[in-house]
Amino acid sequence: MSRIMKKKIHRQSKNIIKKARKKTATKTTRRKLYSQTALEEALMAIEKGDSFRKVSKAFKIPVSTLHRKSKNSDCTVKKSGPEPILSKEIEQLIVNWFLYRAERGHPVGKTDILDGVDWCGGYKYSFHRLPTRSTLVPSFFEAS
């Protein structure tokens, strides 16, 4: 094979690799690169009479966001994603239990946590499987 032919094949394989890389590239979205105070200041500037585009460039907030927020003043700051399963109080109780076990010389390990998760999962499964079941409350809890 001649040297020219090798270069041509090499260039063709490079082009194929570049095309494959372009197809596999993922699009990343940028989310909210501005603060709440910047948004409030921008909305105040719009109320004073500045144009949406000028305010958008000055505060680096998308024009569509400014339109939406100016029309709907009831927009609240909302976290994205699902609500937490455990409340803050229950999480704090679990942390306190971890610390208690560590102070006593029996730190909580991965197996302890997984055993508890398995037990809860089995309990939920059996409880929902038989709808006539009810959780029993010990009599000493009812008396007080």
Image (spheres, rainbow, N blue to C red):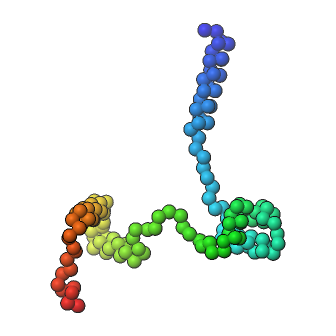
Is residue 17 toward the left or the right of residue 62 in the image? left
Q: Residue farthest to the left?
A: 139
Q: Position of residue 122 (x, y in %)?
A: 24, 62
Q: Position of residue 18 (x, y in %)?
A: 62, 31
* Rendering quarter of residue 140: bottom left
Q: Is residue 107 above or below residue 6?
A: below
Q: What residue appears at the point 61 percent right and 36 percent down from the top-left corner?
A: 22
Q: Residue farthest to the front?
A: 132
* Rendering quarter of residue 142: bottom left
Is residue 23 toward the left or the right of residue 88 in the image? right
Q: What residue appears at the point 47 percent right and 64 percent down from the top-left corner?
A: 82
Q: Is residue 70 above or below residue 26?
A: below
Looking at the rendered image, the quarter that the N terminus falls into is top right
Q: Residue farthest to the top?
A: 1
Q: Position of residue 16 (x, y in %)?
A: 60, 27
Q: Nearer the viewer, residue 96 or 72?
A: 72
Q: Is residue 61 above or below residue 29?
A: below
Residue 92 visible in the shown view: no
Q: Nearer the viewer, residue 59 or 67?
A: 67
- Total count of labels: 0
Q: What residue appears at the point 60 percent right and 49 percent down from the top-left corner?
A: 28
Is residue 77 toward the left or the right of residue 47 in the image? left
Q: Nearer the viewer, residue 43 or 28?
A: 43
